[in-house]
Image (tube, rainbow, N blue to C red):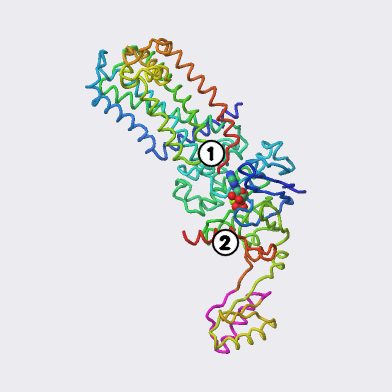
Amino acid sequence: MKSVIAENLTKTYRNGEVKALAGLSLDVEEGTVLAVLGPNGAGKTTLVRILATLLTPDTGSASVGGIDVVKNPDAVRQIIGLSGQYAALDETLTGWDNLTMFGRLYHLSGSASKKRAEELLERFSLTEAAKRPIRTYSGGMRRRLDLAASLIIKPKVLFLDEPTTGLDPRGRQEMWGVIDELVKGGVTLLLTTQYLEEADHLADDIAVIDHGTVIARGTSDVLKSQVGGERLELVVESHNLSAAVALVKSALSVDPTVDDGMRRITVPVSESSAALVKVLRLLDEAKIHPLDIALKRPSLDDVFISLTGHVAEEAVVEVAKKGRK
Amino acid sequence: MIQTIGDCLVITKRQLLQLIRVPEVIIFATIQPAMFVLLFRYVFGGAISSGVQGGYVQLLMPGIFVQTVAFTLAGTAVGLAEDMQKGLIDRFRSLPIARSAVVIGRTIGDSTQNIVTLVVMALVGFAVGWRPSSGFFKVFLAFLFLLAFGFSMSWIGVLIGLSVREARVAQNLVFISVFPLTFLSNAFAPTTGMPRVLQYFAEWNPVSTMVAACRQLFGTPNHFGATANSWPSQNPLWMSLLYMALIVGIFLPLSVRKYKNASSK
Ligand SMILES: Nc1ncnc2c1ncn2[C@@H]1O[C@H](COP(=O)(O)OP(=O)(O)O)[C@@H](O)[C@H]1O
Ligand SMILES: [Mg+2]
């Protein structure tokens, strides 16, 4: 059974000036995870807001758990959990206050909402911070509490809008762990992300969207094979370049691409870490010291270039912005 | 229905919890009017001849009470604008609760906050010579009246808070609109000193009718009003009730509709 169905959704803002969704269709099988992957401005948040009944589409239809989101939003709200792009919590209250408040608003009794708050705090490793105001929390803690708040009634369908954007690597790892747990519990999950790696890690299925429509749909393996999988990149001093090229070629029996100016050798690899070890060992034996050696995973940009022939422009801008902060 | 009332109370409780977690807010919300009492009492008190027994402070206190509850709308507007900005309103809207619960809970919460503020101000007033002479029952009634006015003003705040993009805008909007309203009235000085046009405005101003009504309930003659002998100045209690009903009647449905369509961006 399909838990989420979106059919031909369109949505424009500012009286039609901005087209956020342009006939978007997708579905999520019950008990599975779909990652909606797209650059900034692709329409991810708009899609999530429509599915979570916060916004009505201009045309098209959508249902969650078999219930139409436009015709019967109240019933949809009973079965969904939503954690938006930015943590939506009362900053002045403590984690405990927030969770018990949301529990009461889901119409749990006083004692049931306390019990649920305790469980969730424990599960998300926030028990220690429970009595501190949210404004003292780190970004990762906020996101976890925000997620906890969306799980109060054990939703049938969960929406997570960019759950790790803005988190540091450690926060991201923790968030992934938490989401993995949830998925094992069998929730139906639709999450959005700008990172192919994240979609790959968390989701069964990926829908790539751009300018408000789905441009590719499939498992991460399918998408990656379209992009070309992982690559090994190696930079050496110029007098070692030809020797290194020969060495890589014999070790992996593939023709590497060579960038003479950058003295960089690039080669697609399948068993990536084994290949890395092998090349490193051979280099060492030949007394060639690499200036840089790394495994490169295909990024959202690679996916975009291969699917659309253009880079995910706004994503690039976004990354640049983050770098400046 | 019962569930909706319960939801409202959860939101109200949230606000009262905020006051406990960040007591600075209510402390400043109280210090400001208390300071006004002292400043007006000692700076203008000597200059403005009140013509009532017990001096200027008798006329001043009702004025400051009304000004303070009129500003309830600021707290409501800023609080809601912040909730919008932070995406909390979105979360509330994704919950299975009545459309009206969040905004009703908020206006009740802000009105409850007024109780604390009014009590503190009354004590400060008492300390500097304010002596209502009408007896306990009427004084109590006056305070209920003030709370009701605060509640109705709060609904204007809801609409402002949900309409602006940023909390700071709400703050400024409220100040430039409410301050003139409270000063173009009989709250602090006789309206007879104003230009003719403003006198009429002051007389019909809801702040004036509220102040006049409170003076009546506190047993103080309203020496600062009634230049044109208009109906509002003759019947301030009724006029004030009418104003409150009008404000709530207009702004409550507008606010609930706005809330329904509110989005965080
Ligand atoms: N409230 C709004 N008013 C005007 N334009 C908007 C609004 N919300 C989103 N947009 C525009 O719609 C497009 C899609 O936005 P969004 O759904 O937020 O994308 P994403 O979440 O993928 O970054 C963007 O071009 C964005 O600027
Ligand atoms: Mg977004």
Asked where in the image residue A64 lies, by quadrant, the reply is top right
- The answer to whether one can see residue B69 in this image is yes
Identify the subunit bearing mark 1: A
Earlier-in-chain disc, 1 versus 2:
1
Q: Mark 2 lies on which chain?
A: A
Could you classify mark 2 by the number of other residues whose Cα lies within 10 Å: few (under 14), some (14-19), or many (20 or more)?
few
- The residue carrying mark 2 is A316
Residue ID for mark 1: A101
- Residue A275 in magenta stretch: yes
Q: Does dot 1 land on a helix, a strand or a loop?
A: helix
Q: Which residue lies furthest to the front in this view?
A: B196
Residue B108 horizontal/vertical position (percent): 49, 28
What's the amino acid at mark 2? Answer: Val
Residue A307 is inside the magenta segment = no
User: Where residue B205 appears, x then y in whole percent?
Assistant: 42, 20
The region drawn magenta spans: A268-294
Report if the CB atoms under discs 1 and 2 are less than 8 Å apart: no
Q: Which of B43 and B34 is in front in this view?
A: B43
**Residue A161 appears in the rendering:** no
Query: At x 33% / y 29%, what residue is drawn?
Result: B33
User: Where does the C terminus of chain B fall, quadrant-wise?
Assistant: top right
Badge 1: residue crowd in 10 Å (few <14, some 14–19, many ≥20): many
Side of B46 where A251 appears, left or right: right
Count of labels shown?
A: 2
Q: Which amino acid does label 1 sit on?
A: Met
Looking at this view, is A163 or A262 the one in front? Answer: A262
Which residue of the protein is positioned furthest toward the right in this rendering? A1
What is the x, y in percent for residue A140? 52, 54
Mark 2 close to ligand 1, CB under 8 Å: no
Alpha-carbon span between mark 1 and mark 2:
39 Å
In the image, residue B197 above or below residue A243 = above
User: Which residue appears at 71% of the width and 68% of the height?
Assistant: A225
